[in-house]
């Protein structure tokens, strides 16, 4: 180090080595904790988004422009099966499936309930949705089979039906005609989401189209991307391939499930409340350390002022010392945090009870923190800023110093 | 640097109920390039006068002018700049910076003055050799004797060849060889660079070098003679 001022700042830190290490230690602790928690948070958001989209909505859906706000029977997409296949070829992506949807009254010989009846492509549906995998009694729909239905567990209980029992459904078709059919329950699913388990039922798309007089039309083409990061690219390619945007538009998961973003934001907010408490504690520790160190050195500061240094020079020295301390806490904290997080992002970790839930709801049974440049630096950088901010007060106190009085101090 | 005029300087200190006289209507003019000794018993006001001239302390009343400049009315920042660039201080209690070595203590002020790195090191080594500290440049103040520390403080004060040197008992801890050497150094700086010296001292060896001897007592100047 060529600069005497830098050398002086560095040595001043170690005049009270233990005190400095305590403060740096507090920074290391909170920085590594922040790196881990923020990475875990990001990881669990990825998981949350993935799981929630996997269940049903997929990452992207092609729909009639009005369908998102008013999911009505008449807002259809023409030739849906052929178009879904065209898209599979164009995007070289298999996980694309066509659906149609309508409301119907389902009746067993004992009771009736309103349901949302879905016509699905039984071959491709398992690639875009976890529903087929949630069937825990019986089986999922056979491809192309007529007159089969899978229903939610609560609906089965409400209708008092089991596997092999018959149901009839009654709705209104696209041409306002009656849509009716008699189907056999082949599977019962349990998603853990009460709304779905209570009101959702699936039949084959071809049978749905026949029953609801839809000819070859449907309501949505559901696309599941290999990774959430691919969504923007896919959206761009899909939009570019659309000839008539007044008849068909792509909707990404943000539009399909606006609640998801909000849930993440709410979780973010509550987590940051905790983080801020941590950051404030570190800042106070820095404030305390630097205030003590400034007060102890009154005499030295007096001498420097007598030699011609201005309070601003002294304040800069204090900020420089704080900066060095902070940099140390930042580097060591990020390193330690990164090591712990990297390890856990490979082996994963779980908390008590998590595995049971995972089995029940078809979720992964371990959490994996997602390490990224942002998750590594976000917390520590804010800790550093807080520390520097905290050192401003001791630095400003130097402005009151009178050289003669200060030099007489012990 | 212009001549320094002090006119009717008064300064009192309060210690509890007691009022202590530091300076009592002091009039003195110090011309550029003069070599002045302040002598007088302990508590007579020597340090107080040096502090007032150096702008470290403001008098209660009276004027201090340096040419047309009213030192007693200057702002804090301007006073600091004046000290940094024009005045070399040797304090009675050396006041070295403990975490810096002898060389670094000397270099420190030069860095703040904006002297380039290489020149800083060269000047610091040269001046430390001049005050007889060759080989001790890397020691910290705590590893130096009182006299050695005093010489570092002198080196720090004169390394940038200030226009005015204010020295408070610069020889108090020096043996006669070192004291004579130091006075020789002061004298050559005075003669070759025209630097003004004001030295507060009890030391007869120092007074011998002075061309003007000012005696103080109870905050007053009681005699002022060229010699
Ligand atoms: N900050 C202060 N508070 C109270 N009294 C002070 C202060 N500074 C100086 N004095 C008093 O003012 C008087 C003059 O002090 P000064 O330090 O100028 O004397 P001096 O001539 O330098 O003495 P010495 O030879 O011992 O250094 C003394 O009585 C001293 O006690
Ligand atoms: Mg004195």
Image (tube, helix red, strand yellow):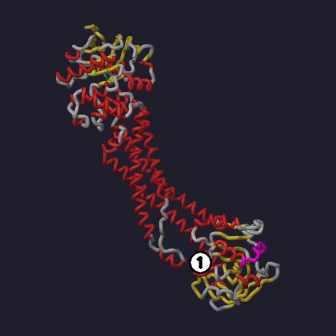
Residue sticking out furthest to the bottom: A164
Q: Secondary structure at mark 1?
A: loop
Residue B30: say if magenta. Answer: no
Residue B21 visible in the displayed image? no
Which image quadrant for residue A226?
Answer: bottom right
Which image quadrant for residue A278?
Answer: bottom left
Q: Which residues are magenta?
A: A73-82
Q: Nearer the viewer, residue A402 or B4?
A: B4
Q: Is residue A400 left or right of residue A73?
A: left
Query: x, y percentage for residue B188?
Result: 27, 18
Which image quadrant for residue A166?
Answer: bottom right
Q: Chain of mark 1?
A: A
Residue positioned 49% across, 58% down in the render: A373
Query: x, y percentage for residue A213?
Result: 79, 82
Q: Is residue A259 left or right of residue B136?
A: right
Q: Is residue A55 above or below residue A186?
A: above
Q: Is residue A215 left or right of residue B162?
A: right
Q: Nearer the viewer, residue B25 or A314?
A: A314
Residue sticking out furthest to the left: B176
Magenta span: chief secondary structure = loop
Residue positioned 35% across, 42% down in the render: A1
The residue where tag 1 is placed is: A130
Query: x, y percentage for residue A240?
Result: 70, 65
Density class for disc 1 (Cα within 10 Å; few <14, some 14-19, many ≥20) is many
Quarter of the image where the N terminus of chain B is located: top left
Ligand 1 is found in which quarter of the picture? Answer: top left
Residue B23 visible in the displayed image? yes
């Amino acid at each position: 180090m060529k600069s005497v001022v830098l050398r002086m700042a560095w040595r001043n830190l170690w005049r009270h080595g233990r005190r400095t290490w305590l403060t740096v230690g507090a920074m290391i602790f909170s920085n590594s904790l922040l790196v881990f928690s923020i990475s875990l948070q990001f990881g669990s958001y990825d998981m949350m988004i993935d799981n929630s989209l996997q269940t049903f909505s997929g990452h992207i859906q092609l729909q009639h422009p009005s369908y998102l706000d008013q999911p009505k029977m008449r807002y259809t997409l023409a030739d849906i099966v052929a178009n879904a296949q065209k898209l599979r070829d164009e995007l070289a992506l298999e996980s694309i499936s066509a659906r149609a949807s309508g409301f119907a009254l389902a009746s067993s010989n004992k009771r009736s309930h309103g349901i949302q009846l879905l016509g699905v492509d039984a071959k491709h549906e398992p690639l875009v949705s976890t529903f087929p995998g949630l069937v825990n009694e019986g089986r999922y729909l056979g491809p192309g089979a007529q007159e089969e239905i899978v229903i939610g567990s609560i609906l089965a209980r409400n209708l008092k039906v089991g596997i092999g029992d018959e149901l009839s459904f009654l709705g209104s078709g696209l041409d306002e005609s009656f849509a009716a059919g008699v189907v056999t329950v082949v599977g019962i699913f349990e998603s853990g989401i009460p709304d779905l388990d209570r009101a959702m039922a699936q039949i084959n798309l071809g049978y749905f189209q026949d029953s609801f007089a839809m000819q070859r039309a449907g309501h949505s083409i559901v696309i599941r991307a290999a990774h959430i990061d691919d969504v923007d690219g896919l959206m761009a390619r899909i939009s570019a391939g659309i000839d008539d945007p007044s008849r068909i538009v792509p909707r990404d998961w943000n539009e399909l499930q606006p609640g998801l973003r909000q849930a993440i934001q709410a979780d973010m907010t509550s987590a940051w409340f905790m983080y801020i408490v941590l950051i404030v504690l570190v800042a106070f520790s820095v404030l305390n350390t630097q205030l003590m160190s400034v007060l102890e050195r009154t005499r030295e500061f007096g001498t420097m002022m007598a030699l011609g240094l201005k309070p601003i020079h002294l304040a800069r020295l204090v900020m420089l010392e704080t900066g060095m301390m902070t940099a140390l806490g930042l580097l060591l904290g990020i390193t330690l945090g990164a090591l712990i997080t990297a390890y856990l992002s490979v082996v994963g970790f779980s908390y008590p009870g998590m595995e049971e839930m995972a089995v029940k709801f078809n979720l992964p049974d371990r959490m994996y923190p997602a390490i990224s440049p942002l998750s590594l630096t976000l917390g520590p950088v804010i800790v550093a800023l807080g520390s520097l901010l905290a050192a401003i007060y001791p630095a400003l106190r130097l402005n009151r110093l009178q050289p003669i009085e200060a030099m007489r101090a012990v | 640097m212009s001549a320094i005029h002090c006119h009717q300087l008064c300064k009192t200190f309060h210690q509890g109920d007691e009022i202590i006289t530091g300076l009592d209507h002091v009039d003195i003019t110090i011309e550029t390039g003069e070599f002045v000794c302040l002598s007088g018993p302990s508590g007579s006001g020597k340090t107080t006068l040096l502090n007032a001239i150096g702008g470290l302390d403001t008098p209660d009343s009276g004027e201090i002018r340096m040419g047309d400049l009213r030192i007693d009315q200057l702002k804090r920042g301007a006073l600091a700049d004046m000290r940094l660039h024009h005045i070399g201080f040797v304090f009675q209690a050396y006041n070295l910076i403990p975490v810096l070595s002898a060389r670094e203590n000397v270099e420190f002020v030069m860095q703040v003055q904006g002297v380039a790195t290489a020149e800083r090191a060269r000047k610091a080594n040269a001046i430390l050799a001049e005050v007889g500290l060759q080989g001790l440049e890397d020691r910290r103040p705590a590893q130096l004797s009182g006299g050695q520390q005093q010489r570092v403080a002198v080196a720090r004060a004169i390394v940038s060849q200030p226009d005015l040197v204010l020295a408070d008992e610069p020889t108090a801890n020096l043996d006669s060889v070192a004291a004579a050497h130091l006075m020789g150094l002061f004298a050559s700086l005075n003669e070759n660079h025209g630097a003004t010296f004001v030295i507060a001292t009890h030391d007869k060896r120092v007074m011998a070098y002075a061309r003007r001897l000012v005696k103080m007592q109870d905050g007053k100047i009681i005699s002022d003679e060229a010699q």
